[in-house]
Image (cartoon, grey):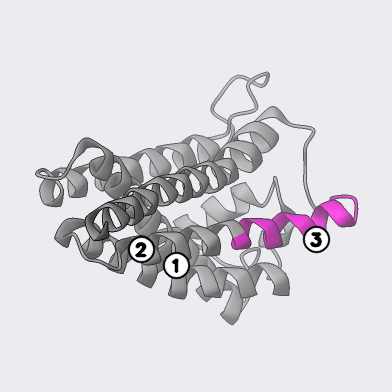
Amino acid sequence: MDTAAPSSGLSLVSVLSLLACSFQVIAAALLTHRYGGRSSVTNRWILLWLFYDVIVHLTLEGPFVYMSLVGTVQTSKGFLAELWKEYGKADSRWLFSDSNIVSIEILTVVLDSVLAVLLIHAVLRQKYYRHFLQVSLCVCELYGGWMTFCPQWLTGSPHLDTTHWLHLWVYLVFFNGVWVLVPVLLLVQSWFSLKTLHNDVITKNK
């Protein structure tokens, strides 16, 4: 049932989807405050992203993988199925267990979640392998985004709905763009951190 004005294009499910994303951000912020309170400002922002990243992978993408392996989102029931059906209005591949999408999501849920959890530990404990994990995770996230959309672009984007502002700018551009912008920023941060460490070693050995 559509509870908003017709001109807005917002349905009850779309509102609930956006609220669910907001709750995930709040949960990530609470975890960052709980575990990263003594970290630097930069690291607290990074931890906020990492906690959010893990939450999304496990609570949204994990159930998507399960629904896609036992059936399809389109034939599934429940709150999370409705959220994915809402996103499927922007990209219909998520509705019928597209093999490319499911393959990427399996890798994302398993590998990216593990890398993010290990990176959280590395940031909090100041481990020497922190930037190795950070670079690895960012490359995986960017690769997943590229392989999600590049095949569509090469074939004329037959499954993407770019005619509706909500589907285009919120679901496709914003939510997917975040997983491009943040990994790029983290790669830049790793670059400068490793550069500083390298210069310190060179200076010390002179």
Image quarter (top left, top right, bottom left or bottom right) of the N terminus: top right
| Residue neighbourhood size for the residue with mark 2, other residues' Cα within 10 Å, grouped as few (<14), some (14–19), many (≥20) | many
Q: Residue at x 77, y 37 (%)?
A: 162
The quarter holding residue 65 reads bottom right
Q: Is the residue 155 above or below the residue 63 in the image?
A: above
Q: Mark 3 and mark 2: span between their CA atoms? A: 26 Å
Identify residue type, mark 3: Pro
Q: Earlier in the sequence, mark 3 or mark 2?
A: 2
Q: Residue furthest bottom?
A: 70
Name the residue tied to disc 2: 116
Residue carrying label 3: 151
Which amino acid type corresponds to the residue marked 1 in the rendered image? Answer: Asp
Q: Which mark is residue 112?
A: 1
Q: Are marks 3 and 2 in contact (CB under 8 Å)?
A: no
Q: How many residues crowd around disc 1 within 10 Å: few (fewer than 14), some, or many (20 or more)?
A: many
**Numbered disc 1: secondary structure:** helix
* Left or right, residue 153 beside residue 50: right
Q: Main secondary structure of the magenta part?
A: helix
Residue 105 is covered by the magenta coloring: no
**Along the line of sight, the residue nearer the viewer: 55 or 135:** 135
Among the 4 quarters of the image, the one containing residue 110: bottom left
The residue range painted magenta reads 143-157
Could you tell me residue 21's position as x and y percent?
41, 43
Q: Residues within 10 Å of mark 3 (few under 14, many from 20)?
A: few
Q: Nearer the viewer, residue 89 or 48?
A: 48
Question: Of marks 3 and 1, which one's residue comes earlier in the chain?
Answer: 1
Which percent across, then down, holds residue 202? Answer: 32, 56
Classify residue 33 as left or right of residue 78. Answer: left
